[in-house]
Image: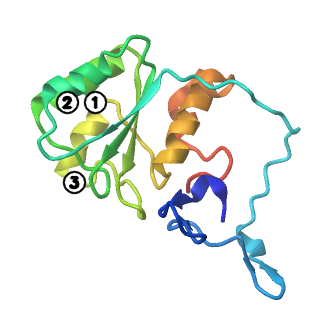
């Protein structure tokens, strides 16, 4: 499986990982059968190692009944630069005015908010339903079909490294290393 497209589902089994939104790269049996069509081939750019990550990020998992006070507290974390917002289904969130206000305020402060689904598979279709249009209006970026694990890592990477940090929105919307479609 591609590491940045996989999610750990079991803590004690050998078959603990799943790649719901991306096919297997290879299957091992008597021999190893590679799925050549899905192997990642980076663009013709020189190999470069990046070692910086910006840890001024957090994950906010929405749940029914989450309160304004909880969300405000999280978004008021000192030094916060980015939030991975785990939403319902295909990228939906409560339509409470207070949530929209907090997200707009965060955007104005330069805090990047990336919308990912709490579902194991599927994708965020931000703006498709009324319950996600307000996210788009508030400056929230669609994470498409990226996993939460890849999203937080990508956000930390993008915020810490040029040229990615020069256009954070574009860097988050585009696949950098095959982490999203």
Seen from the viewer's position, the closer of residues 5 and 91 is 5
Query: Is label 1 in contact with label 3 (beta carbons under 8 Å)?
Result: no
Q: CA distance from mark 2 to mark 1?
A: 6 Å
Seen from the viewer's position, the closer of residues 170 and 63 is 63
Q: CA distance from mark 3 to mark 2?
A: 15 Å
Q: Quadrant of residue 36?
A: bottom right
Give coordinates of residue 181: x percent, y percent.
55, 57
Query: Is label 2 in contact with label 1 (beta carbons under 8 Å)?
Result: yes
Which residue is pictured at 58% across the width and 67% down the height?
Answer: 22
Q: CA distance from mark 1 to mark 3?
A: 15 Å
Q: Earlier in the sequence, mark 2 or mark 1?
A: 2
Q: Residues within 10 Å of mark 3 (few under 14, many from 20)?
A: few
Q: Which residue is mark 3?
A: 129
Which residue is pictured at 50% across the width and 51% down the height?
Answer: 146
Q: Quadrant of residue 167?
A: top right
Asked if residue 160 shows in the view, the reply is yes
Left or right of 38 in this view: 85? left
Left or right of 59 in this view: 172? right
Residue 100 disc label: 2
Which residue is pictured at 76% across the width and 30% down the height?
Answer: 50
Residue 138 disc label: 1
Q: Earlier in the sequence, mark 1 or mark 3?
A: 3
Seen from the viewer's position, the closer of residues 174 and 1 is 1
Give coordinates of residue 104: x percent, y percent.
26, 23
Quarter of the image that includes the N terminus: bottom right
Left or right of 34 in this view: 83? left
Position of residue 112 relative to residue 34, above or below, is above
């Amino acid at each position: 499986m591609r590491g940045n497209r996989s999610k750990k589902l079991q803590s004690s089994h050998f078959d603990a990982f799943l790649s719901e939104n991306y096919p297997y790269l290879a299957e091992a049996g008597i021999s190893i059968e590679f799925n050549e069509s899905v192997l990642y081939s980076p663009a013709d750019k020189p190999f470069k190692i990046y070692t910086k990550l910006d840890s001024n990020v957090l994950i906010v998992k929405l749940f029914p009944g989450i309160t304004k006070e909880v969300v405000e507290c999280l978004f008021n974390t000192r030094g916060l630069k980015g939030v991975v917002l785990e939403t319902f289904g295909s990228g939906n969130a409560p339509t409470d005015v207070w949530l929209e206000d907090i997200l707009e305020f965060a955007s104005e402060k330069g805090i990047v908010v990336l919308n990912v689904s709490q579902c194991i598979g599927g994708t965020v279709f931000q703006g498709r339903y009324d319950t996600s249009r307000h996210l788009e209006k508030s400056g929230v970026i669609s994470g498409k079909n990226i996993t939460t694990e890849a999203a937080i890592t990508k956000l930390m990477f993008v915020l810490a490294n040029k040229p990615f940090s020069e256009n954070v929105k574009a860097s988050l919307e585009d696949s950098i290393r095959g982490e999203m479609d």
